[in-house]
Amino acid sequence: MKQQFLNLRTFAFAMSSILLISSCTDDSSPLIEEEKGNESRWITIAAAQMGTNPGDGNGGTLIYAVSSEDAKDPSKSIAPFDNGFIVPSNRTARLQSSEDGNTIFNISYAGDTGGNYSKYTVEGGQVFAPTGSEVSIAPYVGSAPRWIKLFDGDQTGAAVYVSTEHQIDDNGTPDDVTDDTYTRTEATIGVVTLDLENSLIKNFQEHIVPLSAEEEAKGYYFSRIDMPTLNAAGDKLYIGGRLSKRDPATAESDSNYEILGSKTIVLDYPSLLNPTVITSTVGHGNTNGYRSINAFEYNGSVYQANQSDPEGSHILKIDANNQYDNSYDFNLDDALGVTGAYVLAWRPAANGKAVLAYRHEGSEEGVAGAQGFFALVDLNAKTAVKIDAIPYEADFYLFQYQGFAVDGNEIYLTQAPVGKNGNMYVVDTETGVVTKGAELVNTTGSHFIGAF
C-alpha cells in the first residue's frame, strides 16, 4: 500500500529532546528542524496546474514539502494538486529556494500581484509560513519580471528586463515614408537587485547596451535578457541574452538570419554599472535560458548553457578574466550522440557533475510539446550520458522545468508526463546511481516543474 501524505498542521512540542531520540515520524505532522538533524532536508515539489491547454501551466502553481528520506521512498505518495500550498501568482510562479531548502522565495508573475516578492519558511507538507515583509519590484522591472536568486548565501535576488526602440532615419522628409531608412535598434536594459533577507530594493540601474556597429547595421539587437549570475569574485554580474534581427531594408522582423556567437552582458557588481558585451566563438545562439537558472559558478569559472545553437546546445565557460574561454568546447550533440540538443534546464552539484534536462530533433511531439530527457553531465570531462533509469514517453514535457534540489552530490528531480502520475528520482552524481522515489500524483493536463 502506498502511503498518502495528509494535509499537515504546524504545532510545537514541549519536549523536543524526545523527538530527537525517535527514529520514526508520524506523517500527520511535519518534521521540524531538530528532528531532521544533519541527515535530512526539505524537498519542495512544484506543480503547475493546467490553464486552458494541457501543459500550459497557466492555472497556477502548487508546492508541497517532504523530507529527503520520504522523497526517496517509493512507498510514499505526494499529491500537491490535492493538498498543496497555492503560491501567489497569476500564472506559473517563479520560484527559488534557499540552499538548505528551508526557505522558498517567490515573485508573482503577471496579474494584479505581478512583481510582488514574498518569502516562506518551509514547515512540511502544505505548510509554508509567510516570513518577513513583501515588496514589489514591478515599478522597476514590470509585473512579469524575469528574476533569479544569486548564489551569495541567499542574500540577493536580481531581476532584469529589456525594452527596444527601432530607430528610423526619415532623411528630413517625414511625410515621405518611402525615404525612411532603418538605422539600428536600441536596446535598454534594466537591472534591480533585491535584499532577500530584509525585503528591500538594493540597487537599480538602466543602460543602453549596443552591439558592434557592424552587427547593429545588419539589424541585430538584444530582444530578451535573463538569468543574472555572479562570478566567483563577486564583482561582476553576467546576464544572458537573446538576439533578434530586423531586415535593414524594410525594418521588418527577420526570422531567417545568421545566428551570431553567444553573448553575455557583463556589469560591475554591486554597482550594476559599466556594461560590456562578451561573445563566444565556440557556441552560437541564446544564453538567457527560460524558466530555470542557466549559468552556475563552479571552480572559479561560470558555466553557461546556450539554446537555439545551429550545432546543438553547448555548455560554455566564462573564466575569472570575465571573458569566454574559447578553448573549452563542450558540444552536447557530440556528447549525447543526438542532433539539435536543446538545454531546457540544468543544475550542477559541488563536484562539477550535473543533471541536465534536454530535448533534441528526435524528440517525439507530445500533448504539450517536444518530449524531454535527463542526462548526467561532467563539466570537467565534458561528457553527457542520458539517464536511462528514468522512464520517458512523448508527453514527458520539460520546457517549463524550473528547479533541481541539490543535497551534497545528490540531485532530486521530478518525472511525470503531462496529466499522468510519475515519481521522484534522486541521482547520485558521483556514482551515477539513480534511486526511484516517492510517487507523484498528477491531475488532468497538469505537470510537475521541479524540486527545490
Image (tube, rainbow, N blue to C red):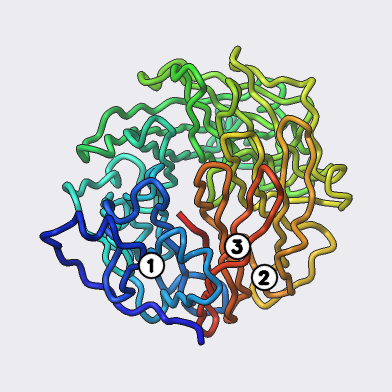
Q: Which residue is mark 2?
A: 396
Identify which amino acid the numbered label 3 is placed on: Tyr
Residue 332 falls in which quadrant of the image? top right
The relative height of residue 28 versus residue 414 in the rendered view (above or below) is below
Of the numbered discs in the image, which one, if any, rests on residue 162?
A: none
Q: Position of residue 137 (x, y in %)?
A: 29, 44
Q: Nearer the viewer, mark 1 or mark 2?
A: 1
Identify which amino acid the numbered label 2 is placed on: Phe
Identify which amino acid the numbered label 1 is placed on: Tyr
Q: CA distance from mark 2 to mark 3?
A: 14 Å
Residue located 44% across and 40% down the image: 161
Q: Which residue is mark 3?
A: 425
Q: Which residue is mark 1?
A: 64
> Which badge, 2 or 3, comes first in the chain's sequence?
2
Classify residue 191 as left or right of residue 187. left
Classify residue 255 as left or right of residue 103. right
